[in-house]
Image (cartoon, grey):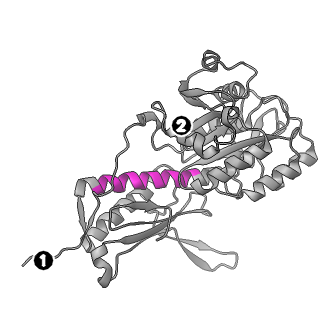
């Protein structure tokens, strides 16, 4: 008589993507620069002059964005793609445009999208399309205060207050000093665990035309802009997503989601079947903890004596000792009657290096082997 041994069979739905180049995989700062006025196949750009060969003029929005990004130095490649929306404005929605990109043979992976869209109504369409993609994509939207009022831009930010949408303000309608492209370039130049957007000095920009009142208004509204120079140096102000959290907080989470998925997928393929018992529990737990320890080594996760799951003791203003749990992993295996389904849920959190913010990830693996990250079943 056969003995039934419940396992997690992972091989039913696991797919390994191989179309992305090695340099464009699992870095949440990889960006796609999108033109909505010209048809361009996905192309790697190493210098602004490459855009001239694609038919762009030096006066075009996309040319200036790429030039501003490259001027920050240290960028190896930029991916440019274009779809002339005017050719079929009714059907070429943001969703259709990005679906078209994914079907391009030369398409590369990206997580940050930088648009040439400066029209507020068009920006709303893109924000609506990207808001649900909080576990995979981040949208940079730049609007100028010449064609748009600060009141309207602030209302846009509030209406699309998502962790994966960031609104930038330019002080002109000439599309120079592209703070969205500059911000991406400055982030891309630094290690994932070290950059803080709002403290990043930017290079090669001109004097912004913001009044003191406008700067205070934008700063209080959580909008991103290039500051008037302090001691002759320009900085990016705020560095916040539309929900008021730092841009890097969302990028940290994207890195963890991708890394966790890659490592769990590798475990699925190598092990084939994981027993639903203490041994299987420890396999999954080890993978999750390994991701957090990697985050600690990258300067993302806080730790005590090298342990990101330790208890940190602090003394408050009254002299009392307060204990804080830096991180925890929780795994929930199915109940006895549902054990044949072999589903299990997991959740973990850890504290970022600043000691204040946290990354919290939840997910589950279904009986068919489907791995769902960023959600609760």
**Residue 346 horizontal/vertical position (percent):** 42, 69
**Residue 103 horizontal/vertical position (percent):** 48, 37
Q: Which residues are magenta?
A: 251-268
In the displayed structure image, the side of residue 83 where residue 8 appears, left or right: left
Which of 74 and 222 lies nearest the eye of the viewer? 222
Which quarter of the rendered picture does the N terminus lie within? bottom left
Instruction: Give the prevailing secondary structure in the magenta stretch.
Output: helix
Q: Residues within 10 Å of mark 2 (few under 14, many from 20)?
A: some
Q: CA distance from mark 1 to mark 2?
A: 50 Å
Circle 2: element type? helix
Residue at 27 percent across and 68 percent down: it is: 280
Residue at 62 percent across and 51 percent down: it is: 130
**Residue 292 horizontal/vertical position (percent):** 44, 58
Q: Which badge, 1 or 2, is on the more N-terminal residue?
A: 1
Residue at 54 percent across and 26 percent down: it is: 43
Q: How many marks?
A: 2
In the image as oriented, which residue stretches furthest toward the bottom?
337
Residue under circle 2? 101
Confirm whether the magenta stretch covers residue 262.
Answer: yes
């Amino acid at each position: 008589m056969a003995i039934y041994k419940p396992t997690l069979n992972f091989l039913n739905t696991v797919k390994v993507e191989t179309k992305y180049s090695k340099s464009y995989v699992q870095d949440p700062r990889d960006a796609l620069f999108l033109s909505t006025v010209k048809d361009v196949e996905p192309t790697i750009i190493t210098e602004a002059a490459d855009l001239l060969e694609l038919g762009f003029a030096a006066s075009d929005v996309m040319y200036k964005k790429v030039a501003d990004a490259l001027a920050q130095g240290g960028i190896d490649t930029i991916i440019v793609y274009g779809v002339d929306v005017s050719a079929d404005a009714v059907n070429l929605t943001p969703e259709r445009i990005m679906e078209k990109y994914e079907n391009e043979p030369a398409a590369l992976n990206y997580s940050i999208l930088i648009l040439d869209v400066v029209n507020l109504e068009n920006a709303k369409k893109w924000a609506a399309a990207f808001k649900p993609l909080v576990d995979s994509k981040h949208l940079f939207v730049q609007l100028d205060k010449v064609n748009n009022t600060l009141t309207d831009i602030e209302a846009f930010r509030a209406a699309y207050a998502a962790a994966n949408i960031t609104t930038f303000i330019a002080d002109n309608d000439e599309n120079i000093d592209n703070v969205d492209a500059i911000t991406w370039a400055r982030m891309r130049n630094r290690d994932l665990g070290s950059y803080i957007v709002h403290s990043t000095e930017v290079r090669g920009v001109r004097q912004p035309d913001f009044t003191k009142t406008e700067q205070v208004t934008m700063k209080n509204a959580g909008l991103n802009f290039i500051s008037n120079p302090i001691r002759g140096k320009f900085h990016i102000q705020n560095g916040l997503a539309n929900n008021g959290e730092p841009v890097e907080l969302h990028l940290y989470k994207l890195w963890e989601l991708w890394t966790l998925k890659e490592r769990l997928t590798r475990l699925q393929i190598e092990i084939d079947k994981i027993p639903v018992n203490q041994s299987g529990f420890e396999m999954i737990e080890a993978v999750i903890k390994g991701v957090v320890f990697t985050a600690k080594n990258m300067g993302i996760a806080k730790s005590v004596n090298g342990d990101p799951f330790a208890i940190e003791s602090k003394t408050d203003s009254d002299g009392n000792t307060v204990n804080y749990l830096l991180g925890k992993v929780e795994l929930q295996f199915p109940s006895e009657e549902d054990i044949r389904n072999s589903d299990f849920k997991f959740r973990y959190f850890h504290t970022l290096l600043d000691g204040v913010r946290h990354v919290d990830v939840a997910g589950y693996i279904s009986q068919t082997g489907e791995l769902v990250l960023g959600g609760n079943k």
